[in-house]
Image: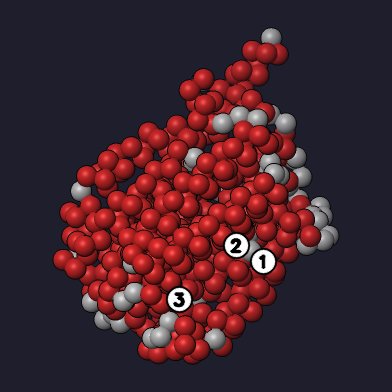
Amino acid sequence: MPSERLRQSVASRSSSFIQRSLLTTGTRLLDLPSRYGLHLLIATRLPVAVVGAFYIVFSTMTLASGFGRVGLDRALTREVAGAFGQAHPGAAGHVIRQTFWLMLLQSVIIAGGLALIAAPLATHVLHKPGLVLPLVLGALTIVPQNISIAAAGALAGLGRVATSQMIYSWLWPALFCAGALILPMTVQRTLVLIGGSLLLTAVVGVLLMLRFLPENKTAEGPTSVKPLYKTGLSFFSLELMQLSISSLPSFLLGIFASTTDVGRYAVAWRIVMVLNLLVSAIAAMAAPQFARLHAAGERRALARVAAQAVGLSLALGGLPIAVLASSPVTLLGFFGPGYAPAAPVLRLLLAGQAAMVLCTALPELLGMPGHARSLTRINLCSLALLCVLLLTLSRRFGPEGAAGAVSLTMIVNCIAIAVAVKKDVGFLPLFALRAS
C-alpha cells in the first residue's frame, strides 16, 4: 500500500511538472515576437556595419552584467525553493533582501568600472573610438538589468516560474519593441531605449516579488553571505560559460574582423538561440523542482522529472532543428539581404545547440542538489577551451571560426557535465527517459 501511494505521488508530480513545463514553455514563446522582434528591428533598421557595432557593445555590457550577479540570482532560486521544500517559508524574505542588497552593490561597482574604462577599451582594444559613448550607455543598463534578474530569481524560487520568465526574458524586449516602432533608431538611441525598458521591467519585477512574498517575516534566514556566495559562484561558473558563449565571440570579432562580420555572426547566433529559449524555459521549470525533491529526499521523483525535462525538450526541439538546418539562407533573409553569407555560420552554431537540447537541465541537475565543485570545475575548463579556440579560430577564419569554436566548446561541455551527473547524481536523464 505505501508503495502504491508512492507511485501515485510520483506520477502526480510528473504530470504536474509536464503541465507546468508546457505552460512555462508556452509563456517563454512570447520571446519569439518580443526578443526576436528586438533583433529584427535592429537588423532591419540599421545598416549591417552599424548592427555589428551595436552587438559589440551589447555583448560587452551583457558579459559585464554577469559579474554584477556572480550567480546570486540562481543561488536565490535554490535557497528560496529549498526553504519551501523544508517547510520554512519564513526564511525566504531574509534571503531575498540579503541577495538584493549584494547584487545592487556589485552591479553599481561593475557599471561604474565599465563606464570608466570605456574610452581606452574602445580606442586601444577594439580600435573603434566611436564606441566610447555607446559603451558608457551600455554600462548604465547593468544595474536595472541585474535588479530585474534578481526579482526573477526570487519569483522562480517562490514557485512563480511563468512570472519569473516574464521578468527575466520577454518583458523588456517587448517594451523595447513598442518604443522602437515609433522612434528613429541609432546605436545610442537603441541603448537608451534598452536601458529604459530594463528599468521598467525591474520595477514590475520587484512589485510582483513583494506581492508573492510570504507574510511571515519572523523566521530568520542565513546570517552569513558565505552560503549564498558558495552556491552562487558554482552557478556563476555556468552563467559565465553561457555569457561567454553568447558575448565573447562578438567582442573578439570586433577586434579581429569588421563590424559587418560581427553583425552577420550576431544575427546568425540570435536565430539559433530559439533552441536556447526552449531549453532554458524547461530548465527554469525543472531547477526549483530539483531543489525541492532533493531537499525532501525523493530520488525517484527527481529522476522522473529530469527525464521528462529532456524528453520534452527533444519533442519540442526537433522541428526547429530541422528547419534551421535546411533553410538557413531563407531565415537569414528575413533580417535583410546582407546576412545571407552567414548561412555556414548558422549551421555550425546549430551543432552546439543540438547538443544542448540533448543535455537539457543537466547543469541544474548537477548544481541544485549541491554538487558545486564538479559544475565549477567543468565550466572553468570549458571556458578556458572556449577562449583558446576563439582566439585561434576567430583570428584565422573570422565568423566561421568563431562559430566552430562555440559549437565545439558546447559539445565538450555537455559531454563533461553528463559524465559528472552520472557520477555524482547516479543516473542520466536521457537513459532514464528510455527506461521510463
**Is there a contact, CB below 8 Å, between mark 3 and mark 1?**
no
Quadrant of residue 366 in the image? top right
Q: Secondary structure at mark 3?
A: helix
Q: Earlier in the sequence, mark 3 or mark 2?
A: 2
Q: How is the image coloured?
A: secondary structure
Q: Is residue 397 above or below residue 19?
A: below
Quadrant of residue 392 in the image? bottom left
The residue at the far top in this view is 1
In the rendered view, does 373 fall on the left or right side of 341? Answer: right
Residue hosting label 2 = 150
- Identified at 75% across, 40% down, the residue is 87
Name the spot of residue 242 as percent of width and height, x first: 51, 57
Residue 81 visible somewhere in the drawing: no
- Identified at 33% across, 37% down, the residue is 318
Q: Secondary structure at mark 1?
A: helix
Q: Secondary structure at mark 2?
A: helix
Spatial CA distance of label 3 from label 2 is: 16 Å
In the rendered view, does 16 fall on the left or right side of 319? Answer: right
Crowding around mark 2 (Cα neighbors within 10 Å: few <14, some 14 to 19, many 20+) is: many
- Identified at 19% across, 61% down, the residue is 340
Residue hosting label 1 = 100
**Is there a contact, CB below 8 Å, between mark 3 and mark 2?**
no
Q: Earlier in the sequence, mark 3 or mark 1?
A: 1
Judging depth in this view, the residue of 430 and 347 nearest the camera is 347
Quadrant of the frame with the N terminus: top right
Name the spot of residue 306 as percent of width and height, x first: 55, 34
- Identified at 51% across, 20% down, the residue is 436
Name the spot of residue 419 as percent of width and height, x first: 59, 37
In the rendered view, does 181 fall on the left or right side of 389? Answer: left
Residue 296 visible somewhere in the drawing: yes
Q: Is residue 95 above or below residue 48?
A: above
Which numbered circle lies on residue 195? Answer: 3
